[in-house]
């Protein structure tokens, strides 16, 4: 048995996986770097739902399209400054040889094993196909030693003083064979193809655990003694749920007070149950791209209608979020209402700007290639549930009045409101002369007429990672979530099937949102088919804040690989760094075994 690792150090293993059926775990997902950790160097625990955390970027083709890439045989090592490097064999999207990478290996740098920067290709030997590679920094020589083998079984070594200088690698020298870097592990991880393992500081490992595992409810904090003169006062006494990652969430409690006489002074030992709103999945079948908005004290639900082939847009109104899923649907728009909207009524979103309410949605004059973003305004004093109270949908235009985009389609438009300015964010897919896939764009809009842009469109992100271009090259469905920590935009990526997933963009609260450089895209998706059992292809989500200040994720997913898209609702948690957690299920949010709390109630009496 391996010797126990120094108690201040933890072993971290990198690995790839064997591909499965395309919609379960495709090659573009399997051929990425995954991470696991171990306390003893033998029994490893997969992180991030046994999903990849590091993906090779696609590269540009001469015609402007993207060439997807994957990676194999990743190798973790320390850089000279104590941060982390990853060296790997870049492959084609399905894991086969990559002609663009002949004689080279792909290099990444990371400060924390969570966020990675792709440095580029290290050229080792022009006429070789690299099979396996290792890299170590030799402190005595003050050089990086790169050992590798080719497809013919030959072994080589290259040196580099500064590995970040891609052109500073020495010519290859024939070398003795080196043992495979793959370690033998006792791990119950589906499909694992082990790579190497390194020892990392416990603080680094703890952060990995807190970021790459779903937290769970472990205990509560409740006042031990409360003085209250009425039921209303007691109702304001809440519990704080504490989670395994050190985060917390304030929860309302339904206190049991049948034995309390509020008219007489006395002490009571009372119990209560933490209130947990549970929304079983699915809530609405054949409803995709869902949006719930709270406006003037009521909740409204609108979504793409898959049941009728996307021919109608309908709205539901209720006093509560739960009430929406029993509420009557009122049709607002169909493909017979207007001559310029004859097909593909997609992804409606409700947004209030000032005193006005709008629906942003996509629609087409007929064909797929004609899909464009539109905005529909509620008339003054109008009822959101009445079709007649909505104005004619207007196509979004540039600041010079020309259509937003004419070489392809635009859709999934949403807004960001910040410091009295309104920004629109949308998906745009150039189809002519080449299909470039769907990218995310941003521009400032006129708050009084939000279908008119005030600035030129700026691209924010494109589908460069395997989880974004799996089965198709698509970034779409943006939606903003603003906290006191940052501005987050979630995006939906890949084909709209069980491979669909949710990625995350983030920017500082005071950043210039029109500058693409201020936005950071996570290396891996934050919600996938592996995140919550029984929910396949989650994506195209939105957020709503209820009357208690709780933020809810409204999304669509499938109950099975080939099942229809359905709406789901789940509370948004925030990790210890303030980033959204979308896969905290109800059982982890409030453990049923910890739901009961108690305290001593002191009644002064004499109301």
Image: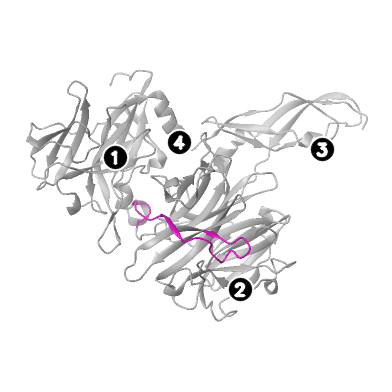
Residues at marks 1 and 3, CA–CA distance in whole angstroms: 57 Å
Say which of marks 2 and 3 sits in front: 2
Q: CA distance from mark 2 to mark 3?
A: 44 Å
The residue mark sitting in front, 3 or 4, is 4
Q: Earlier in the sequence, mark 1 or mark 3?
A: 1
Label 2 to label 4, Cα distance in Å? 43 Å
Q: Is residue 249 magenta?
A: no
Q: Are marks 2 and 4 in contact (CB under 8 Å)?
A: no
Q: Residues within 10 Å of mark 1 (few under 14, many from 20)?
A: some
Check residue 211 in the rendering and tell me which mark sits there, or answer none. 4
Give the residue pinned by disc 1. 108
Q: Which residue is mark 2?
A: 333
Query: Under tag 2, what secondary structure?
Result: strand
Report the side of 358 relative to 555 (left or right). right
Q: Give the residues in magenta.
A: 444-470
Answer whether labels 4 and 1 touch (C-beta < 8 Å). Answer: no
């Amino acid at each position: 048995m391996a010797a126990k690792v120094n108690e201040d150090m933890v072993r971290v293993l990198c690995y790839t996986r064997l591909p499965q059926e395309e919609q379960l775990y495709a090659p573009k997902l399997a051929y990425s770097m995954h991470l696991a950790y171990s306390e003893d160097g033998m029994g490893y625990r997969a992180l991030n739902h046994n999903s990849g955390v590091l993906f090779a970027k696609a590269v540009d083709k001469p015609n402007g399209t993207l060439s997807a890439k994957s990676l194999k045989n990743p190798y973790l090592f320390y850089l000279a400054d104590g941060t982390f490097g990853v060296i790997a064999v870049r492959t084609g999207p399905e894991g086969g040889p990559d002609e663009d990478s002949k004689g080279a290996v792909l290099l990444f740098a990371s400060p924390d094993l969570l966020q990675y920067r792709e440095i580029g290709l290290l050229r080792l030997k022009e006429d070789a196909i690299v099979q396996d590679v290792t890299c170590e920094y030799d402190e005595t020589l003050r050089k990086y030693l790169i050992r590798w083998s080719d497809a013919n079984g030959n072994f080589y070594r290259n040196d580099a003083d500064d590995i970040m200088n891609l052109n500073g690698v020495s010519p290859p020298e024939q070398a003795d064979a080196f043992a495979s870097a793959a370690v033998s592990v006792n791990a119950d991880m589906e499909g694992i193809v082990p790579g190497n393992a390194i020892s990392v500081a416990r603080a680094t490992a703890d952060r990995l655990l807190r970021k790459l595992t779903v937290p769970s409810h472990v205990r509560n904090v409740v006042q031990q003694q409360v003085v209250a003169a009425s039921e209303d006062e007691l109702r304001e006494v809440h519990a704080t749920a504490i989670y395994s990652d050190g985060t917390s969430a304030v929860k309302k409690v339904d206190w049991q007070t049948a034995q309390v006489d509020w008219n007489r002074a006395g002490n009571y030992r009372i119990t209560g149950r933490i209130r947990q709103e549970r929304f079983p999945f699915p809530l609405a079948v054949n409803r995709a791209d869902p949006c719930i908005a709270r406006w003037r004290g009521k909740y409204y639900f609108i979504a793409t209608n898959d049941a009728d082939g996307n021919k109608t847009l309908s709205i539901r109104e209720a006093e509560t979020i739960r009430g929406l899923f029993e509420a009557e649907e009122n049709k607002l728009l169909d493909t017979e209402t207007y001559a310029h909207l004859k097909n593909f009524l997609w992804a409606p979103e409700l947004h209030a700007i000032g005193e006005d309410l709008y629906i942003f949605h996509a629609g087409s004059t007929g064909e797929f290639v004609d899909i464009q973003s539109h905005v529909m305004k509620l008339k003054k004093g109008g009822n959101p549930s009445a079709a007649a109270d909505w104005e004619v949908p207007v196509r979004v235009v540039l600041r010079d009045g020309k259509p937003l985009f004419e070489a392809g389609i635009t859709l999934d438009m949403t807004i960001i409101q910040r410091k009295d300015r309104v920004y629109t964010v949308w998906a745009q897919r150039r189809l002519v002369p080449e299909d470039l896939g769907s990218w995310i764009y941003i521009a400032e809009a006129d708050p009084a007429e939000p279908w008119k842009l005030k600035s030129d469109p700026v691209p924010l992100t494109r589908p460069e990672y395997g989880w974004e271009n799996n089965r198709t090259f698509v970034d779409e469905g943006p939606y903003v979530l603003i906290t006191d920590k940052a501005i987050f935009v979630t995006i939906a990526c890949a084909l709209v099937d069980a491979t669909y997933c949710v990625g995350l963009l983030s920017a500082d609260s005071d950043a210039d949102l029109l500058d693409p450089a201020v936005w950071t895209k996570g290396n891996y998706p934050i919600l996938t088919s592996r995140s919550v059992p029984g929910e396949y292809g989650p994506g195209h989500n939105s957020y709503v804040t209820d009357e208690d200040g709780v933020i809810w994720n409204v999304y669509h997913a499938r109950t099975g690989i080939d099942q229809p898209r359905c709406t789901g609702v789940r509370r948004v948690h925030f990790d210890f760094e303030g980033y959204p957690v979308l896969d905290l299920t109800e059982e982890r949010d409030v453990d049923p075994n910890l739901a009961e709390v108690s305290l001593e109630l002191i009644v002064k009496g004499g109301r």
